[in-house]
């Protein structure tokens, strides 16, 4: 939850409803934000602009968790919120970034109402791949007015296109 001073600041900046608010929060890995957030946003903004989607605001939050984006999005009147957050550090990826999208943000939503693009880091999903997936999910989520389990990633791009596409040798035994 926002502290009272932060809530008041956002309420003072609230204007007419908007399509998308980006929230950048440290989460469980501030290193992920420091290393990856800016480059991901640099790759994402042009894709959103090409789709005719303007970002209303970017909010930086410390001590953040995913659901904080819902509160911020609701205060700012966003149709959708994109929460970029440092994921739980793993043994091989201490700086992994996650992107959570929620249509109709408001306090009390569950993870079933969000889409997630995760594993964004040097050895994981590239900025370009992540920006492609996120922009597709934003565009389709706004168009269909849903996110979460009601919105399956059918973008057809990114990682799935390069994993296992060459099946010419699958199932063939060498004789």
Image: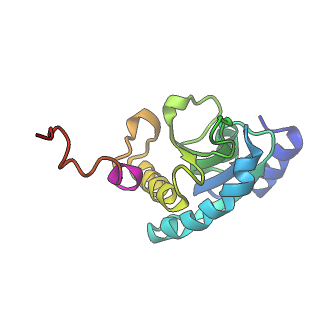
Q: How is the image coloured?
A: rainbow
Q: Quadrant of residue 27?
A: top right
State the residue at coordinates (49%, 67%).
47
Whether 151 is drawn above or below 155: the answer is above
Magenta residues: mostly which secondary structure?
A: helix
Q: Is 67 left, or right, of 173 in this rendering?
A: right
**Residue closer to the observer: 132 or 61:** 132
Give percent across and percent down for residue 120: 57, 50
Q: Is residue 88 left or right of residue 151?
A: right
| Percent position of residue 14, x then y | 72, 55
For residue 7, which quarter of the picture?
top right
Vertical order, 15 against 84 (above or below): below
Q: Residue at x 62, y 37 (%)?
A: 106
The answer to whether residue 14 of the structure is visible from this angle is no
Instruction: Verify whether residue 10 appears in magenta.
Output: no
Look at the image and tell me in which quarter the N terminus lies.
Answer: top right
In the foreground, 166 or 28: 166
Is residue 38 at all visible to an observer of this figure?
A: yes
- Highlighted magenta segment, given as a residue range: 157-162
Of residues 68 and 155, the one nearer the viewer is 155
Residue drawn at the location 35% of the way across and 54% of the way down? 162
Task: Give the x, y percent position of residue 133.
Answer: 45, 53
């Amino acid at each position: 939850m926002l502290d009272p001073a932060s809530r008041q600041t956002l309420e003072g900046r609230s204007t007419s409803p908007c399509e998308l608010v980006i929230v950048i929060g440290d989460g469980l890995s501030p290193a992920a934000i420091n290393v990856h957030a800016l480059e991901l946003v640099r790759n994402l903004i042009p894709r959103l602009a090409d789709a005719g989607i303007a970002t209303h605001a970017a909010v930086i939050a410390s001590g953040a968790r995913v659901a904080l984006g819902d509160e911020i999005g609701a205060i700012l009147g966003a149709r959708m919120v994109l929460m970029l957050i440092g994921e739980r550090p793993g043994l091989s990826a201490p700086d992994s970034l996650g992107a959570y999208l929620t249509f109709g943000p408001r306090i009390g939503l569950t993870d079933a109402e969000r889409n997630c693009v995760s594993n964004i880091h040097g050895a994981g999903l590239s900025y370009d791949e992540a920006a492609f997936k996120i922009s597709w999910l934003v565009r389709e989520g706004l168009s269909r007015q849903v996110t979460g389990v009601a919105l399956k990633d059918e973008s057809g791009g990114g990682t799935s296109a390069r994993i296992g596409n060459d099946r010419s040798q699958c199932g063939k035994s060498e004789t």
